[in-house]
Amino acid sequence: MAIRVQGDIVSEKRGRWMVKLVMAVGLVAFLGIGLYPVVNGVLETTQANSQTPAAETTQQTTNPQQGDLEARARGYELVLEREPENETALRGLLETKLQLQDLPGAVAALEKLVELKPERTDYAVLLAQGKQQIQDFEGAAQVYRSIIKSQPGNINGLQGYVNLLLQQDRPSAAIGLLEDTLQKAGQANQLQPGSVDVVSVQVILGQVYADRQRFEEALAVYDEAIKADPEDFRPIFAKAIVLQRQGKSEEAKPLFDTAAQLAPPEYRDQINQQAEQLSAEPPASPSPESEEAASPEPETEAAE
């Protein structure tokens, strides 16, 4: 899905590096409930279907598995009529609704899961993502704010809320949210050690700056993160990408190499491939919009 930033649509090519960076950063931690891969795949399919001709969409909805999935969903619903707090049945209904591409139905199941298990912030983040997908933006924002209020350092909540704010063309609010989190991180970590992953928050903040072509601010944030933890590959990788986008290939190359050396094995090929792809792309040239974005923005509201 394209993200609007000050009236411009972020192109697929320009946004690709951010998507891959988020994956490499390891910010999304939903694998623990085993549902995020399903959610992610269904959301991508739903977005693609929004641009699919009606005939093709109709053919997809008559898939032979459709009846089986609907029967399975009904089975879970019957169980829940008898046992409304059956978490296993709710999760099964959620997964089935997602496979049916019934996002409103999936959101309803998630709402019940969040009510049943308020301590499970992974359910809450998925609920916020679902509400955002069905364009219930205020509902999504309320869920994200609730997560961040109870867990100020919840990276999935922060990343999700930032994405929502950017989608709503509110970059200053997104930056304010992240800066406020960083300012309060020291106190939060004194009260509960490790509750705020400062480097992860800095990586997200740098993403926002870089996406708006505020490269110098992005690089400054990444330098702070690298100084704080020289062994963390994420800000090094992010800095290399920004330098590459600026056309500074010679400066970027050793950073890509260092990031690949420091990264866990499962990310190394991705980093190397990203370096090769970026080396083939022409350097970004500042545009009037980017120069305007680099100046103080008129928007002053902060995230609630």
Image (cartoon, rainbow, N blue to C red):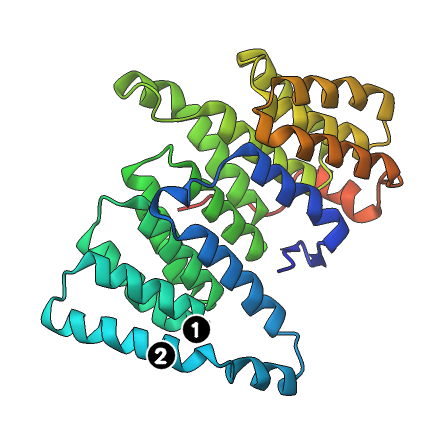
Given residues 272 and 130, the one toward you in this image is 272
Packing grade of label 2 (10 A; few <14, some 14-19, many >=20) is some
State the residue at coordinates (41%, 63%): 131
Looking at this view, name the residue that lies furthest to the left: 82
Residue that label 1 marks:
100
**In the displayed structure, would residue 272 be above or below residue 282?**
above
Q: Residues within 10 Å of mark 1 (few under 14, many from 20)?
A: some
Question: Is 169 placed above or below 242 here?
Answer: below
Q: CA distance from mark 2 to mark 1?
A: 8 Å
In the rendered structure, the answer to whether residue 145 lies left or right of residue 160 reads left
Residue in view at x 40 percent, y 82 percent: 67
Question: Of callouts 2 and 1, which one flags the residue occurring earlier in the amino acid sequence?
Answer: 2
Residue 181 position by quadrant: top left
Q: Is residue 129 left or right of residue 8?
A: left
Q: Circles 2 and 1: CB distance less than 8 Å?
A: yes
The x and y percentages for residue 282 are: 89, 40
Work out whether residue 37 or residue 206 is closer to the camera in this orientation and state it.
Answer: 37
x, y percent for residue 13: 76, 50
Answer yes or no: is residue 127 visible: yes
Q: Amino acid at mark 1?
A: Leu
Dividing the picture into quadrants, the one containing residue 71 is bottom left
Q: Amino acid at mark 2?
A: Glu
Quarter occupied by residue 51 = bottom right
- Image location (x, y in percent) of residue 105: 35, 72
Relative to 246, 192 lies left or right: left
Residue 30 x, y percent position in the rendering: 40, 44
User: Taking the image as drawn, is residue 112 in sight?
Assistant: no
Residue picked out by circle 2: 70
Q: Secondary structure at mark 1?
A: loop
Task: Identify the residue at horizontal 35%, vertical 55% (top origin).
Answer: 142
